[in-house]
Amino acid sequence: MTNLSGQTFTNYTTADGLVDNNVSCGTYEGNGVMWFGTQNGISKFDGTNFTNITTTTDTALVSNTITAIKSMANGDLWVGTDFGVCKYANSTWQCFTSADGLGDNRIKYIEQSSDGRIWIGEYDGLSIYDGTNWTSYNISDGLPFGGIQSIKFDNNSEAWMGSGFGGLIHFDGTNFTIYNNSDGLLNNRVNGIAIDSQNNKWAGNSEGLSVFNNQNIFQNNYTQMYLLPPPDTLNPVMDLAFDSRNLLWVGIYIDYLLNGGIAMYNGFSWVDFNMSDGLIGPVITDLIIDDQDQVWVTTSSGISKITNIPANVNILKENDVTIYPNPSNGTFMIKNSTKSGYKLSIKNIGGEILSSFKNKSNTSQINLPYASGIYILEINDGSQTFFKKIVRN
């Protein structure tokens, strides 16, 4: 692991107009507009100025302690508190509680499915709003104990949820399927979920990161993404998200060390950074990536925006280089659609260079006279270095 260099950190606090430095959550509306939930109200940021909403400025808001926030496709803003969930539309609040059909007033997470329904993760379970009626689920319906603290949707529009104590939950609209320690999950406290373009599920939990493939079968665990002083290695994940380049961003906070930061994964190696690199604080609470691939990090000390991510941390776009067959019995064909004359290096999973050569055409053949396993193909086009995973049967 190395510290990321070349990026720009821009930090925001109450000195810049933020309503409170203890920021719990955020959401991207579009057109450069961000919303943040804090322990003392809501802040809207238009890229230049903050506009704040509190129970003092707007008495219809039920609480200043914001636990979840989500901007919806139609522009409505939904806000979670410990006293119910509220919709903000056309400068008007509409709040819902258990008296209206909400399963639990203590809100942990808010998400929207592709059909427009609003999904609410609660301390006691899950509630779904179709625009008219609420449908709620709890332990009696098959959910594990611990509530729902993260919700994401896969490529089939089916829900994946993180439980506070019960593991990773798959909901196909009818049945709940639970994945826990016995299925390979590092820890049953799942704080965040991300689903990649291949429909793999990445579950951030209290001991690290667990991956289930597109067949929902356990694939891998990551436990040392963020570098800590020896002998500590624990990497509790608070949140995670993919950007448009398929770079994975992971927020990590180790409470007993008061240490935390961000780790970025390009598919083969991790890069980490923290306060020494410009991050505003160690207590990571949320990660939001906007449509410009700017990474917004909310913390208990304020907000950091990370921009100008160096190009040399990109992974190669899928359509730039084709490797086939992959897996292979040892012979691979490589086709580069962008240019010829690039350097190729074969590395083992530990990063040791096994062989290297320069390709003189857009198409070449490489032979891998090594044992079966996973290898890394490093491609350097003269300006950037990219990586591809290849598998020898």
Image (cartoon, rainbow, N blue to C red):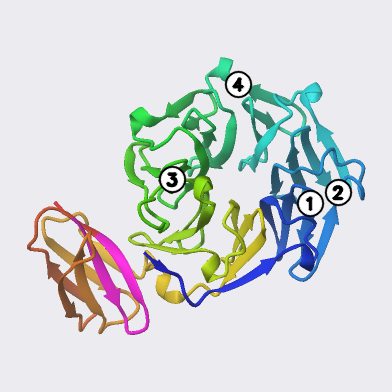
Mark 1 = which residue? Answer: 42
Main SS class of the magenta portion in the image: strand
Q: Earlier in the sequence, mark 4 or mark 2?
A: 2
Q: Is residue 335 above or below residue 84?
A: below
Q: Amino acid at mark 4?
A: Asn
> Residue 281 in the image: x percent, y percent?
60, 60
The disc label shown at residue 202, or none: 3
Q: Residue at x 56, y 65 (%)?
A: 293
Q: Earlier in the sequence, mark 3 or mark 1?
A: 1
- Verify CB contact (< 8 Å) between mark 2 and mark 1: yes
- Verify CB contact (< 8 Å) between mark 4 and mark 2: no
From the viewer's perspective, tell me whether residue 26 is left or right of residue 200: right
The disc label shown at residue 54, or none: 2
Disc 2 element = loop
The disc label shown at residue 138, or none: 4
> From the viewer's perspective, is the residue at label 2 or at label 3 nearer?
2
Cα gap from disc 2 to disc 1, whole angstroms: 6 Å
Stretch in magenta: 374-389
Disc 4 element = loop
Q: Residue at x 29, y 66 (%)?
A: 322
Residue 118 can be seen, yes or no: no
> From the viewer's perspective, is the residue at label 4 or at label 2 nearer?
2
Q: Earlier in the sequence, mark 2 or mark 1?
A: 1
From the viewer's perspective, tell me whether residue 104 is left or right of residue 95: left
Q: Amino acid at mark 2?
A: Thr
> Residue 123 in the image: x percent, y percent?
64, 29
